[in-house]
Image: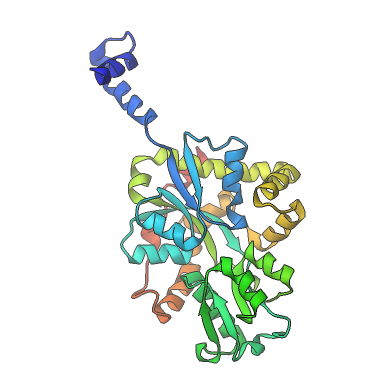
Amino acid sequence: MKSLQKRLACSCLFPLALVLPPLLAACDRQHEPPLRIASSPWPGYEPLYLAKEIGYLQPAQARIFELPSSDITLESFRNHSADMATLTLDETMDLMQSGVKLRILMALDVSNGADAVMAKPQVKRLADLKGKRIAILNIPLGVYMLSRTLEAAGLSRQDVQVIPSAESKHEEMYRLGKADAFITFDPFKTALANRGAHVLFDSSRIPDEIFDLMLVREEVYQTRRAEVCNVARQWLRTLEYMRRSPDAAAASIAKRLGVTPQAYRAMVQGIKTPGAEENLALLGGEAPQILNAAKRLNAVMVGEGQLKREIDIRPALPPDLQACIGG
């Protein structure tokens, strides 16, 4: 009875036969839970938290869960604990291989120096990595960076000792002398630099290969398209706010990260953030630019045994991105 009274109240005083079905649908939409967005520490994801702080992304629309690492974010998306997630292109391909149905909503950023090999002072050149211990997060991105680093150094996997470890452990490993080089990213990269490590190799030498993406579960993309597209629009709106008010934005983000605004600006120097037009070029049209990066990733991941076969990401690209981000 209470349920019926609630529904009747939603119909106001209009003839029930005309208004009840659409109003019932409206009531159902009003009671949809907020979209669950899983993320992990990475300066490139900070506009998401800023959108929440300045009121562009309302709590009733979306809830952001910052998880300790990207591998936990990946599993939360895989096991349906999240509707959307911030993950890398290689992680996207890993999910697709395992049968997860998803859409790439947007390219959030492109690493252009932010992912790096940080080495102890005595490791001065890439060739010095021979015989050394390299700590990496044992996920596709870590292995990909290792592969590209060894390629640049003219070394093979047999020439180095690889130590799988969480990025959050790298600073302690450096302090205790448990590794000679670390494949990492900010904020962990900056922590290592503060300990005396230096950049030996970074993603600026392999431009437009490492992408961070906003993923959406396929069923969510199909059934809650308006809400999903609103997240994309508020992301772009926040980027515009950051361009208009760089000092205020940097101060807000730095406070959340517990660093100075100058330190935050240093963190994002190696990150490119695509706007609307760049996203359309990367993910849309007859020849999406992201396919070039996917092709190289496929080759490395298949060679490393991380993929059993080549993954075609085209089915995951949004067919209506322009309409989605345009309003």
Q: Is residue 259 left or right of residue 95?
A: right
Residue 261 % position (x, y):
75, 51
- State which quarter of the image contains the N terminus: top left
Q: Position of residue 293 (x, y in %)?
A: 50, 69
Above or below residue 152? Residue 238 is above
Look at 75% across and 53% down and name the residue there. Answer: 260
Tell how many labels.
0
Residue 231 position (above or below residue 9): below
Query: Relative to the observer, which residue lies in front, 10 or 234?
Result: 10
Picture quadrant where residue 7 is located: top left
Q: Is residue 127 left or right of residue 314?
A: right
Q: Residue at x 34, y 17 (%)?
A: 10
Residue 138: tell me if it is visible: yes
Q: Is residue 148 left or right of residue 79?
A: right
Colour scheme in use: rainbow
Determine the image quadrant of residue 247: top right
Foreground of the two, 256 or 155: 256
Q: Nearer the viewer, residue 111 or 63?
A: 63
| Residue 123 sits above or below residue 9 on the image | below
Which residue is pictured at 60% across the width and 50% down the height?
46
Furthest residue in direction front, as rendered? 176
Q: Residue at x 60, y 80 (%)?
A: 178
x and y percentages locating residue 131 in the rendered image: 59, 91
